[in-house]
Every structure is written in structure tokens, then in C-alpha cells.
Image: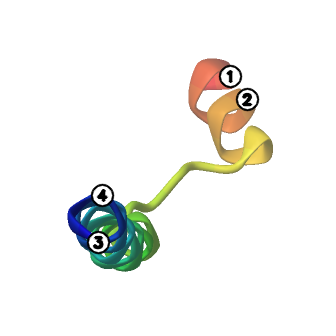
Amino acid sequence: MLGFAVVALIGLALYFLIKSMNKQMTKIQVPHEGDITEKKAE
């Protein structure tokens, strides 16, 4: 029973960590390839 509780808690923590990571990843703005080549041309 204790082993199941530990695995369940780790799974629950992993779920919330992944959910938080996805929220943070949407905030990151990645420049497109076209933008990078335009800046180099200037």
C-alpha cells in the first residue's frame, strides 16, 4: 500500500510539473528563421 501511495504521489507531482512547464513554454517567444536572416542582413 505504501509503495502505491509513493508512486501515485510522484505521478501527481509529475502531472503538475508538466502542466506548469507547458504554461511557461507558451510564454517564450522564439524568433522565426526569416527574422534571424533579416537581422543579419542589416
Looking at the image, tell me whether mark 2 or mark 3 is earlier in sequence order: 3
Q: Residues within 10 Å of mark 3 (few under 14, many from 20)?
A: few
Three-letter amino acid code at disc 2? Thr
- Mark 2–mark 4 distance (CA, rounded to whole Å): 54 Å
Residue in view at x 68 percent, y 22 percent: 41
Contact (Cβ within 8 Å) of mark 1 with mark 4 = no
Q: List x then y, in percent, for residue 29.
A: 44, 61
- Mark 2–mark 1 distance (CA, rounded to whole Å): 6 Å
Quarter of the picture containing the N terminus is bottom left
Looking at the image, tell me whether mark 1 or mark 3 is earlier in sequence order: 3
Three-letter amino acid code at disc 3? Met
Contact (Cβ within 8 Å) of mark 3 with mark 4 = yes
Three-letter amino acid code at disc 4? Gly
Three-letter amino acid code at disc 1? Ala
| Residue under numbered circle 4 | 3
**Residue 40 vs residue 1: left or right?**
right
- Mark 3–mark 4 distance (CA, rounded to whole Å): 5 Å
- Mark 1–mark 3 distance (CA, rounded to whole Å): 64 Å
Residue in view at x 40 percent, y 75 percent: 15
Residue in view at x 29 percent, y 78 percent: 16
Specify the label residue 1 is tagged with: 3
Q: Quadrant of residue 37?
A: top right
Q: Is residue 26 above or below residue 41?
A: below
Q: Is residue 9 above or below residue 38?
A: below
Furthest-right residue in this view:
34
Label 1 vs label 3, nearer the camera: 3
Label 2 vs label 3, nearer the camera: 3
Q: Which of 10 and 33 lies nearest the eye of the viewer?
A: 10
Q: Residues within 10 Å of mark 4 (few under 14, many from 20)?
A: few
| Residue under numbered circle 2 | 37
Specify the label residue 4 is tagged with: none
Which element is circle 4 on? helix
